[in-house]
Image (cartoon, rainbow, N blue to C red):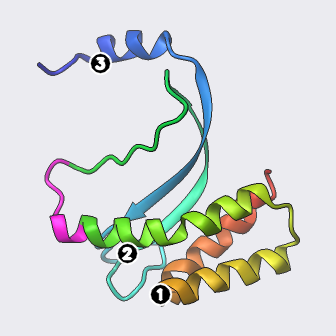
Amino acid sequence: MNKTKQELLEEAARKPVRKFVQMDGFMNVEGDSVMRTDADGDTVCYGETDELRNLHDIVRIQIPWDADADAVRRIVGKMAAMVDIVLRLRDDHRTKHQHRELIEEAARMLDKPCSVELGADRLEAWSEQW
């Protein structure tokens, strides 16, 4: 049974607001996108978000219903490779120059400098919020 929009809103209204680190993986980006992608056409972005959730100790991956399994495995692998870097930036109040070094380390880990390059700009802006 699919829930109605109203049912989802009523359910969400009862949940507390919790802060999360959010990683978004965009697969097969085509055309004149503002996103800078790697050789696979993928990019990974990071940030913080407030969400309505009952549970705090949860990591959730949401996959589009009709997504290609190979593309999903590829992008999830790239996101997994970035977890340590993203959490170090969250916890560490370094200078932008030091953040750039961490981001370059991440690029070497992924061997995908273009996908991390977009992330570098977003990570630097995001890290200033912490």
Nearest the viewer among 86 and 7 is 86
Q: Quadrant of residue 25?
A: bottom left
Q: Amino acid at mark 1?
A: Lys
Q: Who's the residue at 63% across and 69% down the image?
A: 85
In the image, what residue occupies the spot 32% across and 12% down? 6
48 vs 126, left or right, is left
Q: Nearer the viewer, mark 1 or mark 2?
A: 1
Where does the image place residue 86, in percent across and percent down from the top left? 63, 63
Q: Where is residue 44 drawn, in percent x and y?
A: 47, 68
Q: Which residue is mark 3?
A: 5
Residue occupied by mark 1 = 112
Does label 1 or label 3 sit earlier along the sequence?
A: 3
Whichever of callouts 1 and 2 sits on the residue coming sooner in the sequence is 2
Q: Is residue 102 magenta?
A: no
State the SS at label 2.
Answer: loop
Which residue bears the numbered disc 2?
Answer: 42
Q: Above or below — where is 12 with respect to 26?
A: above
Q: Residue at x 50, y 56 (%)?
A: 23
Q: Counting other residues with Cα less than 10 Å from the Cα at mark 3, is it few (<14), some (14-19), or many (20 or more)?
A: few
* Disc 2 residue type (three-letter): Asp
Q: Which of 34/119 is in front? A: 119
In front of the other: label 3 or label 2?
Answer: 2
CB within 8 Å, label 1 to label 3: no
Q: CA distance from mark 3 to mark 2?
A: 31 Å
The amino acid marked with disc number 3 is Lys
Q: Is residue 88 left or right of residue 50?
A: right
Quadrant location, the N terminus:
top left
Q: Which residues are magenta?
A: 65-71
Residue 55 location in percent, x, y? 50, 26
Mark 1–mark 2 CB contact (< 8 Å): yes
